Amino acid sequence: MAVGVVGATGYTGQGLLRILGRHPRVRLAVATSVREAGRPVAEVLPEFDGLYDLRLCSLDEAKRRPVDVLFLAVGHGEAISFLSDYPYLSKTRVIDLSADFRFRDPAVYQSVYGKAVPAGLNRKFVYGLTEVFRKQIRRARFVSNPGCYVTSVLLPLYPLLARRLLRPDGAIVVTSASGVSGAGATPKSETHFCEVAGDYSPYKPLREHRHLHEIEAYLSRFGAKLVFTPHLLPIKHGILSDIAVRVKDAPKLLEEKIMSAWRNAYRGCAFVKPVAHLVRVAETAGTNLAKFAVRVDPETRTVLIFSALDNLLKGASGQAVQNLNVMMGWPEETGLLGRI
């Protein structure tokens, strides 16, 4: 199966190339780069030497070369632009890693990202939180991959709220920390090594971070509101989200009920692992795994959930390929097991 990656030299694009190179059912046929068009993939990205005998191409050239599946690993607004005149759209499956088609309501996307999304095109997309919306993804031709912070929060919370096992008494407080790769490959002074090494700092708190609005969009059916504070970790990749939910009653027994609900919700899922110990970022780095744990404090009626994943894999490229596997009816773990 011929696959194309638009935005192959960004971090999520590189992650896709890494996974697709070990996937037995696909062949990379198109890889784009605005800056490096015309150069061999292995010359720009030496880790792929011997794996890909392919030159990077421009966006215009990609539109002249049909593929079976197209991954869009581009900035917000760029996926809309590319697809607006993509001539093979009716014959191609699309998996978009930008935020362009994540919101069911185009008006919400426009208010958060300041760009308009065509309502007709937006309706074609299914939200790609694999373990929650697997049935819809299986029937889809267009999938919008969730954000990395969003995945770390929705995976543990969604089944608990859906089963009414958690009934928040007030806002859910989420404190997340991500590696620097979450800021993307484009150099910025605030993510320069000398700025982040040895430091730990909050950024875009409360309603400033766009992922807060995406999380609330999918928890709104449960009436949930969030207080969200992301932090920058001086590591390359990985996310740890601490999720504090105050409830009306929090007996110690609630811990086992939550673990049982997770096991039931994610039974047979290769990449979601509820665990008894407190999770660490290093456990999931370089994998497509999401791991979470829970502790309950009856005195303060607080449920505290710890959720870890790799922001570039389960939070981006890994989940995108997982969605491809689901769409095609292939084993979900194809190309994704072990360290990537």
Image (cartoon, rainbow, N blue to C red):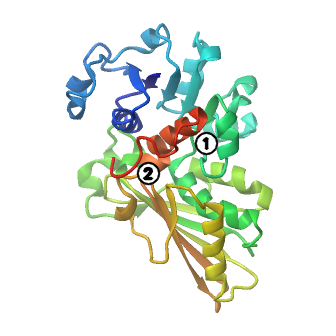
Comparing 231 with 70, the one in front is 70
Residue 276 percent location from the top left of the image: 49, 77
Residue at image point 53% right, 37% down: 330
Q: What amino acid is at disc 1?
A: Gly
Instruction: Report whether residue 248 is seen.
Output: yes
Residue 325 percent location from the top left of the image: 53, 37
Secondary structure under badge 1?
loop
Residue 39 percent location from the top left of the image: 25, 16
In the figure, residue 178 lies in which quadrant?
bottom left
In the figure, residue 79 lies in which quadrant?
top right
How many numbered callouts? 2
Mark sitting on residue 128: 1
Q: What amino acid is at disc 2?
A: Asn
Mark sitting on residue 82: none
Compared with residue 66, is residue 276 higher up or lower down, i.e. above or below? Answer: below
Residue at image point 76% right, 55% down: 220
